[in-house]
Structures are given as C-alpha cells and as structure tokens.
C-alpha cells in the first residue's frame, strides 16, 4: 500500500527516469578506460588528423564529394552515411579516448531513450516504456573484446544505424494516429538512411512490423504501416545492388575504375557454418555471456561500482514494481518476438559472412560489431519475461513482505551484474588505457620532435605493429612525419649494430599519477641502452616524486623531481637502461 501511494506521487516516475539515466550513464562510462582497438587504431588517428588540418569549408566539400562518389556507385559498397564517415565533421569527436567513448555512449543512450519511447507508444503504456528505459543499460556486455565491441569502437556505427530505424518506427505509429502522409515519408527516408549507414539496417523492418502489430492489434494494419519503411529499404537495396554490379563490371574489365574488395560482405551459404556463427553472435548480445565463457572474475571493487549497481538496479526494480497495467499475453508475446528479431536478425547477417564463419573467428567469448544493438533485443525479451513473471506473482497470495523480498532478490541479482561487469572491465582495460594515454601525451609533448630522418621504435604497438598505423600515431599526436616502427617488429628484423634509432616508451607506475613516457637514442635491433634520454611527466603527476633509473654500468640512480602541474620534461645524462626508468612516490 505504501508503494502504491508513492508511485502515485507526481515526482515518482520522473525521479526513476533521472536516477536510471544518471547512474546508467555513469555505469556505462567505464568504457572510457580502454585504449583504442580494432580498425579504430588507424581510422581514428587518420580522421582526427584530417579534420584538424583541413579548413571547415574544405571538409564540407570533401564530405559532399564522398557522398557523390557513393551515390554515383563508384564504391563497391553503398554506405554514404557510415558513422563516422572517412572524412566528416564527426571526426572532431575523436580527439581523446574519453571524448570519443562519451560520443559513442551518447549515441547509445539516444537509442535507449528512443527504444523506450517506441515501446511505451506501441504498447500504449508509458510506464512500460519507462521500465524499458531503466532495464536497457544493464543489457550490454560491457566487459568484452574492445576491438570488436561497438561500445568502444567503430564510431557508434551500429548505434547510428539503429537510431533512424527507431525514428521510423515512431513515425509509422504517428501516421496511424494522424493519417498525415508526411509521417509515412519520414519513415521511408529514415529507413533509407538506416540501411545506407550499415547493412544490418535491412533487418529492422521485422521489429518495426512487430511493434506496429502490437500498436494496432492487427497483422494487416501492421503490414500497411510497414510499407513506407519497406520502400525506404528497397531504395537502399537498389543502390546496393547497383554498386555491386558496377564493381563486378569493373573487375571484369568492362568498366573503367578501381575495384573494391567486398569478399567479406558477400554471403556464403554453408548451412552448418551459418548456424554455428549465428548462435555464437546471438550469445554475444547477452550481458554476461563473455564473462561466463571467459571465466572472468572482477578485480578490485570500488564504492562507485556498488553505487552504480544499486541505483541502476533499484530504478529498474522500482519501475517494474510500480507497473499497474501489464500487457496482455498477446501483447507480451509480440514484445518478446520483436526483441527476438532485434537480437537474431543482425546476428544472422554476421552468420552469412565468410569472414566470420572461419573456425578461428567463432569464439563464444566475444561477438562482433552488431552485438551492442542485439542487446536492445535482449532487453525487450527480458522485459517481456519479467512482465510474465510479474503477472504470475500478482496472481498469487503472498505472506506479508513476501513480494518485497522477491523484488529485493531481483535487485540484488541486477546490481551484482552491474558491479561485476564494471569492476572486471576496469581490471581488464585500465592499464591499456593508461598506457595509450601517457604514450600519446608524451609524443604530443615533443618526445620525438628531434628525431628527423632517424627511425623511431615504439614500445606501444599500434594496430599490430602496422607501419601505416605507427606513423599515423605520430602524425596525430605529434604532427610528425616520423619513420615509426613497433619495437616488437623492429627486433625481428636485421639491423646493423651501429644503426641509430630513437626509442619512445612508457612506464606505468603504481597508479595513474605515476605514469611516464620517455625517449632516448639507441642503436641496432635491440635499443636497450639509451643516451640523450628525455622523460615526460604528464599533467596530473603527483608532486615531490622520485625518478629511478639504472645506468649502463649498473649504477642505480635516485633523482627527486618536482613536476609542474602542466607537465614537465626532464633530461637524463649518460647511458641508461631503457627498461629501468620509473617514477615512484617520494
């Protein structure tokens, strides 16, 4: 009775939404701790360098030129609205790890809000939409291979694909209400943009149909409402097929122009491989899948992890407990099937790709780019299952306090998932993020500014040691056209013992405030002894620290340093062992 009185207060539902959004954002922001991964290790660097070295007018012209190349079928793959584009104003969001990850998170949360709005609209139950809003942040697999997880990488590609599909879903429902054709036109355009961003957009016609059926209660009306969205997809499909045809004619020498390699997105209909890959990819949409298969255990748990878990889970359970109107069985089934379509259909496209059907790629511990939007489907399925359980629980008589105990157990399980994932993510990626950050700060501070034409080797491997990526890193952070190589690769090659080479490295301390970067002149394939060493103490380094290093003759040196709040460059004399340089507390 007390709960019912509280839920009728005007401030209850806005408060639940606010708590869920604030602490859900805080929970998911743990992704900012990880370094760049996957193709981002090259694309992120190149795009940000481009946007910071190009005038606004020229960048707009370049973007329009890229759009013309897509619409005139000059590429084998039709994706004019891919996010971020190769050259576009969104590249400004690639400036640093935190800003980039928050940019991705903003897209993700925009999708969460629109999904909740669409569920509330389709079910004619705003409170069910709020329950969806509160539940969705817990559905993502936060601890995951950051090279393929779209919460970390690929410029929110799949999130920006889902968003126009959600707008299209809202538009067709509005068309049903008003009869105004402009809403049908908006739905058609949104689905065109959705499919022209990433190919998984073609699958979203299925959940749009399901939610339209939920709204109208009739399959025939849902089919009618889906026609504008389907037409938008057909237009995109025509462009796709045209681009592939032109590319095939170029490959055959019938038409002039460069040929795009699109084998990875050409389907392979090996049924066992499809089913195996499909099941693996669907499993990645569930939040704890990777941790369970990887036997991952959380590292150190901080109070903020517990706070996020309690508040996010508390908001979700409060919203569920306060649902006074539950969907009927048919509505709940349609909600579940719509979620199943959002989970399974994008995963099926991955299953058709020969690139991901290879035995080495089928790994139950991780998924690929679409897994983040698949988790939206898992969220709708979970919401439907919880509604079913709520209906059964409310149909039984309980001892006093029995329901409160049940809600408490549900909240504990949800909070445990949040705490586990957040703590495990920090322990898995924090050191990598710190290494990337301090290494980039060191290059930006000028550690390799005097290298000239002398080769540079780096202790931090960029994109598997690829030379283009290594050089892109120095262009991005130091504005240097350096001859850069990864140290691991350099050591496998033949180099004269007297060949000069600069080595740029880093050392992680006992905490973030003791991370340093350094550079020195070495020789040969193993530049372990350095001269002309410079050490960069980045902004935020604690005051009154001690720099330790060992000279080539074995002398251990202890030097007190007093860093400036904006960062300090220190020069060391003599021959120094590179791996001995470290900073510690006074």
Image (cartoon, rainbow, N blue to C red):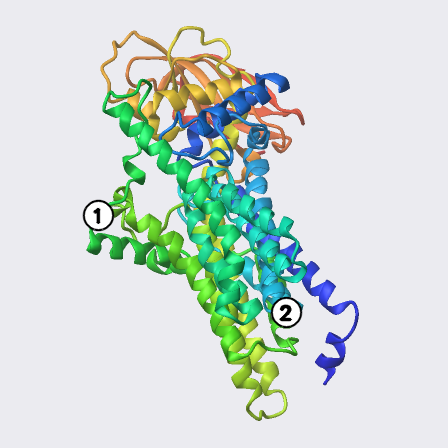
Residue at 49% across / 8% down in the picture? 450
Write down the residue under mark 1. 359
Relative to residue 289, is residue 555 depicted above or below? above
The picture quadrant where one finds residue 216 is bottom right
Q: Is residue 286 visible?
A: no
Relative to residue 10, is residue 172 depicted above or below? above
Write down the residue under mark 2. 124
User: Which SS class for mark 2?
Assistant: loop
Q: Nearer the viewer, residue 550 or 277?
A: 277
Compare marks 1 and 2 and give the one earlier in the sequence. 2
The reply to whether the C-beta atoms of the residues labelled 1 and 2 are less than 8 Å apart is no
User: Which SS class for mark 1?
Assistant: loop
For the image shown, how many numbered marks are present on the structure? 2
Residue at 25% across / 43% down in the picture? 354
Q: In x, y percent, where is residue 532?
A: 46, 11
Residue at 25% across / 9% down in the picture? 496
């Amino acid at each position: 009775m007390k709960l019912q009185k509280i839920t009728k207060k005007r401030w209850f539902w806005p408060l639940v939404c606010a708590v869920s959004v604030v602490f859900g954002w805080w929970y998911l922001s743990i992704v900012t701790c990880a370094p760049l991964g996957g193709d981002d290790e090259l694309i992120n660097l190149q795009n940000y360098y481009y946007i910071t070295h190009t005038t606004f007018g020229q960048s707009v012209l370049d973007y329009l030129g890229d759009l013309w190349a897509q619409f005139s079928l000059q590429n084998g793959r039709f994706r004019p609205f891919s996010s971020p584009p190769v050259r576009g104003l969104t590249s400004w969001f690639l400036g640093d790890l935190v800003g980039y990850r928050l940019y991705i998170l903003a897209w993700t949360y925009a999708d969460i809000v629109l999904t909740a709005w669409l569920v509330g609209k389709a079910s004619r139950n705003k409170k069910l939409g709020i329950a969806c809003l509160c539940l969705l942040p817990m559905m993502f697999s936060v601890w995951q291979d950051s090279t393929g997880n779209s919460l970390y990488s690929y410029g929110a590609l799949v999130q920006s694909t889902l968003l126009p599909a959600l707008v299209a879903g809202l538009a067709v429902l509005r068309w049903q209400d008003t009869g105004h054709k402009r809403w049908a036109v908006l739905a058609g355009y949104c689905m065109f943009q959705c499919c022209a961003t990433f190919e998984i957009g073609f699958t979203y016609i299925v959940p749009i149909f399901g939610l339209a059926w939920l709204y109208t209660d009739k399959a025939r009306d849902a089919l009618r409402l889906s026609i504008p969205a389907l037409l938008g997809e057909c237009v995109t499909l025509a462009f796709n097929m045209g681009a592939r045809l032109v590319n095939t004619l170029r490959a055959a020498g019938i038409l002039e122009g460069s040929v795009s390699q699109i084998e990875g997105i050409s389907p392979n209909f090996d049924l066992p491989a499809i089913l195996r890959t499909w099941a693996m990819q669907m499993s990645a949409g569930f939040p704890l899948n990777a941790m369970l298969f990887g036997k991952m255990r959380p590292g150190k748990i901080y109070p903020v992890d517990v706070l996020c878990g309690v508040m996010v889970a508390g908001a979700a359970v409060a919203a569920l407990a306060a649902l006074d109107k539950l969907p009927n069985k048919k509505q709940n089934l349609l909600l579940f099937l719509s979620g199943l379509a959002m989970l399974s259909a994008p995963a099926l496209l991955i299953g058709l790709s020969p690139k991901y059907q290879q035995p080495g790629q089928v790994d139950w511990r991780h998924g690929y780019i679409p897994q983040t939007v698949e988790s939206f489907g898992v969220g709708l399925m979970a919401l439907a299952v919880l509604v079913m359980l709520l209906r059964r629980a409310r149909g039984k008589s309980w001892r006093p306090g029995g329901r409160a105990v049940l809600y408490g157990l549900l909240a504990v399980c949800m909070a445990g998932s949040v705490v586990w994932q957040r703590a495990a993510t920090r322990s898995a990626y924090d050191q990598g993020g710190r290494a990337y950050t301090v290494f980039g700060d060191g290059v930006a501070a000028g550690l390799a500014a005097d290298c000239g034409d002398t080769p540079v080797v780096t202790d931090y491997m960029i994109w598997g040691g690829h030379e283009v990526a290594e050089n892109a890193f120095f262009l991005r952070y130091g504005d240097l056209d350096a001859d850069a190589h990864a140290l691991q690769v350099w050591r496998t090659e033949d180099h004269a013992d007297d060949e000069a080479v600069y080595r740029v490295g880093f050392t992680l301390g006992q905490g973030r405030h003791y991370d340093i970067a350094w550079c020195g002149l070495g020789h040969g394939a193993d530049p372990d002894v350095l001269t002309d060493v410079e050490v960069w103490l980045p902004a935020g380094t604690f005051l009154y620290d001690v720099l330790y290093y060992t000279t080539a003759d074995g002398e251990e040196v202890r030097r007190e340093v007093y860093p400036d709040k904006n960062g300090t460059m220190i020069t060391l004399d003599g021959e120094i062992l590179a791996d001995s340089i470290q900073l510690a507390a006074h």
